[in-house]
Image (cartoon, coloured by chain):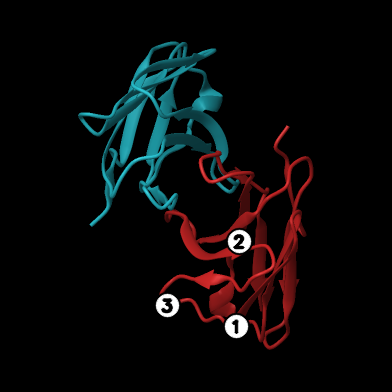
Amino acid sequence: GAVVSQHPSWVICKSGTSVKIECRSLDFQATTMFWYRQFPKQSLMLMATSNEGSKATYEQGVEKDKFLINHASLTLSTLTVTSAHPEDSSFYICSARSGEASPLHFGNGTRLTVT
Amino acid sequence: GQNIDQPTEMTATEGAIVQINCTYQTSGFNGLFWYQQHAGEAPTFLSYNVLDGLEEKGRFSSFLSRSKGYSYLLLKELQMKDSASYLCAVTDSNYQLIWGAGTKLIIKP
């Protein structure tokens, strides 16, 4: 159980375009989903916390107008990287939990390359 | 501030046992998690401790001492595929998850 599906697994896009990443909890309802970014050989960095039906909470230094998060239902959250630039190239990972004290379960991640 | 410490890197031999330590100082405590992350992949959940003591799950065990702010992950009968980073994470009083920087485990034949 506790499967989180993330799509796409990898994407290459041109500078200036937007990319949408989907995160779905397949067998549980996730009131909270989290979006992380990880650069090579670095730690996970929390970008934002997404609560169903409300606005996401962004971490300091993360531009909310650039990284649009929509948590439309208890099983789906999306991250849209708008006007992507090469420096946005990274590994983006979503995670979800069924309750506050429950473990986070991660999607397989999306490797974004902006050319 | 909130802080989680774990060694940056450890090396062990195939077939041996290794213990990865984690100490934490957080605003409250609602559980400690261990995750495994292979290079280029997302983390996978290994264990959860909220009460003191040892939780065993196959070759992996996790121990918690809340009074000492200390946990360890014990890996037995090491296999080459266990080469990965191991992440310690603590849920604080607000149920925020605080992450350690991870321990890179290198297994040698």
Q: Residues within 10 Å of mark 2 (few under 14, many from 20)?
A: many
Which chain corresponds to the colour cyan?
Answer: B
Q: Residues within 10 Å of mark 3 (few under 14, many from 20)?
A: few
Q: Circle 2 sits on which residue?
A: A92
Q: Image height check: is A34 above or below B3? A: below
Q: Circle 1 sits on which residue?
A: A66
Is label 1 in a helix, a strand or a loop? loop
Task: Give the mark, 3 or 1, whose residue is nearer the N terminus.
Answer: 3
Residue B33 is situated, as x and y percent measured from the top left of the image, at: 45, 35
Residue A74 is situated, as x and y percent measured from the top left of the image, at: 74, 55
Q: Circle 3 sits on which residue?
A: A61
Task: Give the mark, 2 or 1, whose residue is nearer the N terminus.
Answer: 1
* C-alpha gap between disc 3 and disc 1: 11 Å
Point 42% across, 77% down: residue? A61
Q: In the picture, which quadrant includes the C terminus of chain A?
A: bottom right
Three-letter amino acid code at disc 3?
Gly
The hue of chain A in the figure is red
Q: Nearer the viewer, residue A76 or B61?
A: A76
Task: Give the mark, 3 or 2, whose residue is nearer the N terminus.
Answer: 3
Three-letter amino acid code at disc 2?
Tyr
Point 31% across, 28% down: residue? B71
Residue B76 lies left or right of residue A69; in this view the side is left
**Going by the picture, which residue comes out furthest to the left?**
B68
Residue B102, picture quadrant: top left
Q: Chain of mark 1?
A: A
Is label 3 in a helix, a strand or a loop? loop
